[in-house]
Amino acid sequence: MLLFGVHQRLVNYDGLFIKRRPLFLWNPDTREIIDLPPRDEDDIEQIKNSDCILLSPPANPDCTVLFVGKSFFLWWRVGDKSWTKDEYEIVRDGIKIDDYIHKVISCTDGTIYALTMQGLTIIIDKEPCGKLLARTLDFERPQSYPETLCFHAYLVESCGEIIFVVIHSEGVTFKGVNHIELFKMDFSEEAWVIMDCLGDNVIFVSTIGADSMSVSATQSGLKGNCIYFTLVQDKHNLYVFDLEDESISIYLPCPNLRTPSSLPFWLLPSNRLVEKQNVDENTTAKKELKMEAMRNTLAIIKVNVEKSERICWIDLPFDLVAMIAMHLPLAIDYMNLRCVCKTWAFSVRPIRWRVNPTGSTIEYPWLMSSNRESSRCKFLDPTCNITSHFDMPELLYARICSSKDGWLLMSAGDYSMFFFNPFTKEIVELPDLTEIFSFSGVSFSSPPTSPDCVTFGICFRGFNEVNIYFVHLEDDAWTNILGVSEARFTPSNVTPVFCTGAFYCLG
């Protein structure tokens, strides 16, 4: 059963038993039920997998239930004895195109926005005669990751903004998540722009129906700047994507429940939000005064400490600083030491970190995370669970595609790729791609400091065909080869592995 919740009302839409079960509105708090008129059998078959929205509560005289099919709108308004069916067309630059509405959302101001399968932005308007029509906006399409074959897309309204959420899956199934992207509708630029922060808001998206929503993290008691979602192939777990570090956490909120027959949905009880909004103002004011007093006390203590125990780092002998640096086992500690002051940075020279100063190879990897919209990145040392933050302008608007021996293979834009060493800040450029970056997997054989370094990429072409790209450091252009398999092969979004002179790819 698919339940769609808006304005504390639910639209009951059962894709399996729709022909036998009537459609109705249901309030889970009051148990009130409002029966809706029956629909034509042909219409039911055509809209059983389409989006449905409730434009306002049933108490509102303009309350409307809207189903969006591939070529028509099916809607009902309070007081109507039957459903109304309006045909629509997708028109671009005055020409009808073979496209249809895929996602739809109703905003608080009454505007209905939608996206088509080809990524066009649509507004659903009502003519004076009462007929619904689809009007195409002159918006650029969201420039999403091109290399994933399967993804889920969602429209969400958050604080008056329209947000487009794209969850990219691994390979050709929906069992795992490769990456998540957010775009917001920019009316001034008439385009969808990348969004990397939700602030104090939390977004909930659901695979079924159109019951995606945004709430305040402070009022709901949740961690802000996160997206909560479920997967089609996983009916038990709850997934949380943190935009700050682009990490995904998995939770099992109800371990003792039986496996549900259908996917869960999100329901926002409005009465709980009202209770949180009605917090006693006097209590809040007292908390603010206490916090202000604590800040003042800490500030006084800090000033006294600085006056009495001020340390001058440059007083340490240079040879002692160098000796300390050479006995640090981790590159992060060494880099932090050089960042203490300019004098220490001058006396402690930068070194390569494939082998540490004691001569023993570092056997464990570090976890690095970055945000394309920021030059800040983080390194996590798994041995002592310490996270260090660094500013690296080279990472701005770039994506990490692969890593090996301290080197990162980066992509910037649609055609540019380069190597970057975050420890030495070295950059090795690669020739521009001849086509838009669309690799399912990309890797390299050895560090770019080696003359044998080969960069390799593979992308899906169709059925049993793939495009294979490779380039040597001394080459002026990429080499493209068409690969044909006897059986159907679809490359997965897994980094190819180089071993004994060959790259191995999973499908």
Image: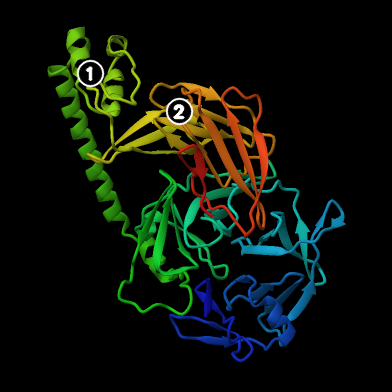
Q: From where the camera sits, is residue 145 visible?
A: yes
**Residue sitting at 67 percent across and 88 percent down?**
37
Residue 119 occupies quadrant:
bottom right
Residue 484 position in % (x across, y down): 66, 51
Residue visible at 46% across and 32% down in the picture: 408
In the image shown, does 443 or 293 lie closer to the viewer?
A: 443
- Residue type at mark 1? Ala
Q: Percent from the top left, x then y, of residue 48?
A: 64, 78
Residue 413, how many percent across, how many down? Answer: 61, 35
Q: Which mark is residue 63?
A: none
**Closest to the observer: 410 or 86?**
410
* Residue 95 position by quadrant: bottom right
Q: Is residue 108 above or below residue 11?
A: above
Q: Which residue is mark 1?
A: 325
Q: Residue at x 34, y 26 (%)?
A: 354
Q: Which residue is mark 2?
A: 447
Mark 2 vs 1, N-terminal side = 1
Give x and y (percent) for residue 258.
Answer: 36, 79
